[in-house]
Image (tube, rainbow, N blue to C red):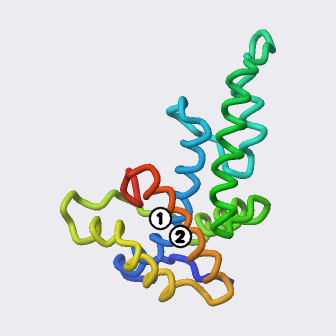
Amino acid sequence: MLSTCSSGKDPRQQSEERIVGEIAFQLDRRILSWVFFDLIRLYGFTVSNIPQKIVQTSTNPLSGKVDESRRADMTRRYLHIMERLTRLGYHPKIHPTFSEYIVNTYGILRQRPELGSKDLLNYNDPYYLRRMIIAIVPTNYLKDCLLLLNCLQHLAKDDGKPLLIW
């Protein structure tokens, strides 16, 4: 069983644990934003339900008419990002659910770190994040949590944005 954030822990320890969930959350957001690039709000969207959401968002809810071009574009984007992540060891049938589990277990950061703060610098340092994961996550989940960080790092490098985006 994974340890969870509890009220008995000091705020610093809770924040350190929450960074593990934040990494998983940020990876999922990166994937969703890539596939659904033209949507601002992604409530109810998960990496696990991307195929269903592609169908839903490419179908007019009133007429039932399908925007085939939009559907094909989103499907192509989904397959492309999954292919890139699969090369890193990401399994589309396993890691989306694992990621949700990590977010639900550890939570996410409650607030964005202040600009110029040490936390903001640390949270965008892959070596710092790797050390945090190793220190916090039980060994049976360590490999997969490190993989999520590696995937996030890869996508951040490709899009030229920081690891964690708020």
Q: Give the label on residue 150, or none.
A: 2
Residue 143 occupies quadrant = bottom right
Q: Is residue 33 above or below residue 103?
A: above
For the residue pair 30 and 68, the one nearer the viewer reads as 68
Where's residue 38, x and y in %?
Answer: 54, 29
**Image-based side of 79 in relation to 3, left or right:** right
Where's residue 42, x and y in %?
Answer: 57, 38
Density class for disc 2 (Cα within 10 Å; few <14, some 14-19, many ≥20) is: many
User: Mark 2 belongs to which amino acid?
Assistant: Asn
- On the rendered image, what quadrant is the N terminus found in? bottom right
Where's residue 80, x and y in %?
Answer: 66, 47
Query: Residue visible at 56% across and 84% down?
Result: 137
Q: CA distance from mark 2 to mark 1?
A: 5 Å
Q: Give the label on residue 134, or none.
A: none
For the residue pair 121 and 14, the one nearer the viewer reads as 121
Density class for disc 1 (Cα within 10 Å; few <14, some 14-19, many ≥20) is: many
Query: Residue visible at 78% across and 18% down?
Result: 66
Query: Residue visible at 64% across and 64% down?
Result: 99
Task: Write down the residue under mark 1.
Answer: 153
Query: Is label 2 in a helix, a strand or a loop?
Result: helix
Q: Is residue 151 above or below residue 77?
A: below
**Image-based side of 151 in relation to 115, left or right:** right
CB within 8 Å, label 2 to label 1:
yes
Q: Is residue 53 above or below residue 141?
A: above
